[in-house]
Image: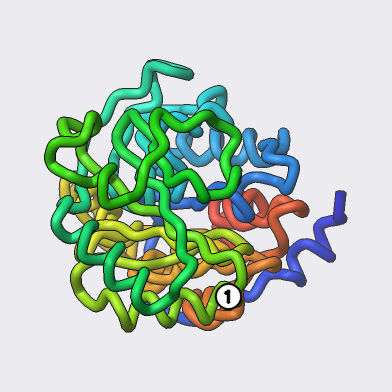
Amino acid sequence: MRDNERVTSAIREPETPAATTPPRLIATDLDGTLLRDDKSVSPRTVAALAAAEEAGIEVFFVTGRPARWMDVVSDHVHGHGLAICGNGAAVVDLHGGPGAHRFVKVRELPRNNALEAVGLLRDAAPGTVYAVEQTYGFYQEPAYPKLHMEVPDDLAPAEDLLADGSPAAAEPVLKILAFHPEMEPDAFLTLARLAIGDRATVTRSSPSALLEISGPDVSKASTLALCCAERGILHEQVVAFGDMPNDVEMLTWAGRSYAMGNAHPDVLAAASGRTIANNDDGVAVVIERLLNGRT
């Protein structure tokens, strides 16, 4: 564990008027941010989250993960226990515990938009393979690699999976996953955004060329803004943390935002402040400072 002098000196504080506004909500990404690389939540981070909620600050987990992958933080739910999953596609109540999460809000990707996005990206980047993430189901093309530790509910071309008459047609589509075996990740992201345009929101959180395609205007930021508006919380009262391109909009929207020491260059440019790496408990360090009135 680093001593206080070294931890404090590693923090770059936001130089914005929001820095003087008492926080009411902490919004934190999980992988590469709150979680260590081994997917654990350190005791120091658990204590910091509990202290924040005890001080009256709400904590939202804001992640690209689907609801069924939230078991990693289910033991650390305090207060309201709400999470924004699927890059803003769903708001989930974690109070039920593993396997019993309840969907509070769903912002689906319309099937017509999804089909258009798949076709346009197939043309722009031949060799792209797809998976379909729904509220409860997960479907993929036969050639889609085993990137996730789960067995798909069905194997078929994306066009068949997204058809109105498919077995999964009754479930909302939360996002499409698009993987390319050869392209550089950021180049693939840029190409996909140009090809798909405003038909869907395209981002990425993986170190590989794996894109996440959500509904138009659906992002971590837009769903977080909706949740804050329902609670009468202003954006300048929000402190956000992230490390990858799918966090950029949220970090730009929040009054105070921190890029992790291990963050993607776009995240470092978007955030108003910087903390140390996820493996060094960078989120906990900032929360401790907030509670001590040092930011």
Up the image or down, 178 lies above or below 120; here it is: above
Between 32 and 153, the one lying in front of the other is: 153
Q: Quadrant of residue 51?
A: top right
Q: Quadrant of the C terminus?
A: bottom right
Q: Is residue 13 visible?
A: no
Residue sitting at x 23%, y 48%: 227
Pointer 1 local density, CA inside 10 Å: few below 14, some 14–19, many at least 20 = some
Across and down, in percent, residue 170 comes to 16, 31
Residue sitting at x 37%, y 41%: 156
Q: Considering the numbered disc 1 on the image, is that residue within a helix, a strand or a loop?
A: loop
Between 56 and 103, the one lying in front of the other is: 103
Across and down, in percent, residue 108 comes to 20, 47
> Which residue is disc 1 drawn over?
183
Q: Is residue 172 left or right of residue 248?
A: left
Up the image or down, 50 lies above or below 64; here it is: above
Q: Is residue 211 left or right of residue 87?
A: right
Q: Is residue 76 left or right of residue 165?
A: right
Number of numbered discs: 1
Q: Quadrant of residue 61?
A: top left
Q: Amino acid at mark 1?
A: Met
Between 161 and 31, the one lying in front of the other is: 161
Q: Is residue 227 visible?
A: yes
Across and down, in percent, residue 145 comes to 58, 48
Across and down, in percent, residue 155 comes to 41, 37
Up the image or down, 177 lies above or below 75; here it is: below
Residue sitting at x 45%, y 48%: 63
The colouring scheme, among rainbow, by chain, secondary structure or one colour, is rainbow
